[in-house]
Image: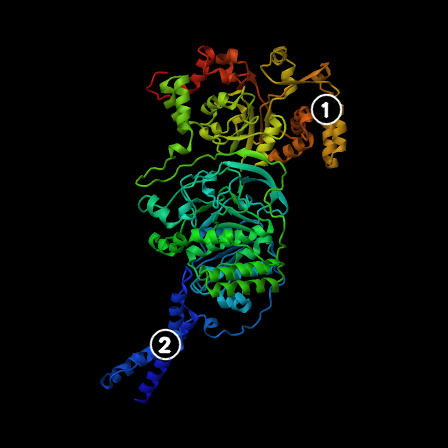
Amino acid sequence: MAVLNLSWMCARQTWQSCLLAVTFCHPVRSRKPASSEVLYQSERSKSPRFWRNIIARMFRVPQRKKPLLYILGALVFILLLKWFRSDNIDWDFVAPAEPAKVQRNAELKHDKWIIVTTVQKPTSAMKKMAQIPNWLLLVVADGKTPKTWSLPGAILLDVKSQKELHYQVHSYLPYDSYTRKVIGYLYAIEHGAKYIYETDDDNFPEGDLTQFQTSMGQSELLLVETKNTTYNPSVHFGQGTMWPRGFPLDEIGYPSSRDYSLCQMNVPSIQQGLVNGDPDVDALFRLTRKHGLEDLDVKFDNAAPPVVLPHGTYSPFNSQNTLFTAKAFWALVLPVSVSMRACDIYRSYWAQTLMWTLGDNVGFYAPNSVQKRNPHSHIMDAYEETELYHHMGAYVYFMKKWKCDKVFFFDCVSQLTHDLVERGFFVRRDADLTDAWITDLATIGYAPPIMRSDTKSCHTNDPLHVVFFPDEQETVLPHSSRKMIPTDLVNHQYVNKYLTETCGFAYAFHWHNIMHEGHKFDREVLVISLQNNPEDIIPSLEATYRPHFPHILYCGEKPKDESFLRLWRVSYVTPPKQVSGVSCVLTAMRMRYHATAYIHITDTMYLNMHGSKLLSNQNHLTWVTGELDAYRPDTVNLCKEGSINCIPMSKDIISQINRYTNEIELDNAVKSKIKQCFDKLRADPSFQAQSTLTWVTDMTFRVPDTAQDKFKRLAEFYNKDAQSMKYDFFSLLLLECLEHTVEYMAYGDVKEAAEVEEKTDYLFPYPFKLVEIDEGPLNQHYCKHFEKYAPEDEPK
């Protein structure tokens, strides 16, 4: 009986202690500020006297029932002993102890780290991460991570090691939690990290992460022009009906801007890559859009240029495929009071608000990873995302209004977190974790960024205005097992109308067949220089080239009516100088398309889509030199009548270019190579035979990715002002000389198109603007191209 009494007393005391601990240490969380009356009642319920009365009533048990309670108390006591011996309890929460310091690995220094947390054996995705050159994989273990976890090329930070690191954040990080990654962040920073790529154990990076910008300083990027509070990056990358997890539901219906500024700006300190396959959308999207038990399998536009958000405009970013540069390491900490499906989203809005005080931005990049999602319950995901559905709108609204009144940046970080606690979005433990995080960062030597008074995003005084539309991708729609592209997100209906009026009703169906069966150059950008009014020429060009080139950039003078561009959903830019092949391609390269090659033509060129060298996917420069064309008498006549654009030059141009080259800052080895090119040109018999030179500026050429850097350097050197447009020719001529392999193209006259088309690379000059009104051979030739894709049983 004495043992039973002792058990009863211990169980009773333990039960009371647990109740009091739960009451005082873990108050009920409220997302919205309570009124003073409700707050008073809440505080009253937490008082010790209140709970002593409750407990006293619970243990007023009749005498006849006490033996049963003694037995029950003994069982509870035994269970509690077993529970307290469990390894699942973090004893730091019960009675924080001072862990022994361990010697850091002073020899381990690495600048690029991949950080994941997992409870699984090494997955295929992690095995791939461990093999990425120049990156070191750090796996942060949790309570359920297999004790025998091991992977060559990876570092495992097990639970014991995490404690022994003696980071202050450890006392605030629960086990079985995604937030264990916070310890890994500190470990990487302490061991020399300059870049941290965070991802998940079911994410397969592609391209060795080279698509991210791992360089400090500034870069030219597209800055979206919008004053909206939010921006949906999925739209920019070709999924116009999709939204990322954490996007405020009440903002989904607002249209996304298609206007951008090409700006010189700081390289984004946080870079979010899109993910193909089963991307990071919320459970509402999956439950309403995926087909049956199948996983999502969608793609984004792989070649779309990066996009940067202006200050004041938010978009959620996740922890699935995200690069943090050293300047943004302070933003890695994750709140612990919210669910796993919400913690990185809360962090993303919190981080963006603070980034703007530093003049920093977040950037979104074309997909460079594939997600093969681990098994999930979508209903449980929806449950964990509930707070995102209900509170993100208010959370973002508060963030946009918030201002820091501190001088030092870390004080602003702490102030914002504490303000979020007061507003009910976070709890006190999140604020304590943030303060501990700041202390740990200072302890390991991380210097806080300096706040700036000038925090504007764009550092260009007169940025180029760009209208951009991506290659819209197929998506999944409710109650449909077939993926499709919503018709109002593409210009197909307008092309069909144009072809029906120009060629006939059946040709709209032929064009539809080309869209599905024609060869596509998914990663090559077709740049078309316009000499004609966009409204007169773009419809015929779209019908001809859109089935083969998903990425077309029209380059011309500022259009009179930009609404036409949005109606036809085409990308358009006006270069800073005169419209020319070199300036237009250089502008496209500055936009940073994720492309394998840039092809340039003018609106007076008809490409042979069935045999042109431009379309051969060869990895070398392809072009036709302007001066060789000008040697032909018929070319000179075309110049005189204005059918093509030409610039007369004297032979002294070589000496002018040579002097100009000596004045610019260029590597001596390159200058020496350029001098050899000039000497080679002077010795050319064709050049010596000419008394004057005529340069045909309507050039067609293809610059592969292997020659892009050389092209940009030469074009920037020889294209500094509008008056030096005649130097454009030498940019390509010198590029030809510096390249090892050059392919030349042949062209034919449109007058003999039927006879020469199959033997030439393109027809030139080709009057696209007359196709619609011509009723003779020109119209017949244009329409015949589409007949090649007519069904076999249909007469052509």
In the rendered structure, the answer to whether residue 747 lies left or right of residue 650 reads: left
Say which of 205 and 216 sits in front.
216
Residue neighbourhood size for the residue with mark 2, other residues' Cα within 10 Å, grouped as few (<14), some (14–19), many (≥20) = few
Most distant residue in the front direction: 37
The x and y percentages for residue 104 are: 60, 65
State the SS at label 2. helix
In the rendered structure, the answer to whether residue 788 lies left or right of residue 348 reads: left
Query: Can you say which quadrant of the picture contains the C terminus?
Result: top left
Most distant residue in the left direction: 64
Sequence-first tag of 1 and 2:
2
Q: How many marks?
A: 2
Q: Which residue is mark 2?
A: 50
Quarter residue 578 falls in: top right
708 over 513 or under it: above or below: below
Query: In the rendered structure, which amino acid carries the disc numbered 1?
Result: Lys
Give me the disc on residue 680.
1
Residue 278 visible to the viewer: no
Most distant residue in the bottom direction: 2
Query: In the rendered structure, which amino acid carries the disc numbered 2?
Result: Phe
What residue lies at 36% left-to-right and 76% top-to-bottom? 51
Residue 605 visible to the viewer: yes
767 over 225 or under it: above or below: above
Mark 1 in CB contact with mark 2 (< 8 angstroms): no
Closer to the camera: disc 1 or disc 2? 2
What residue lies at 41% left-to-right and 20% top-to-bottom? 499
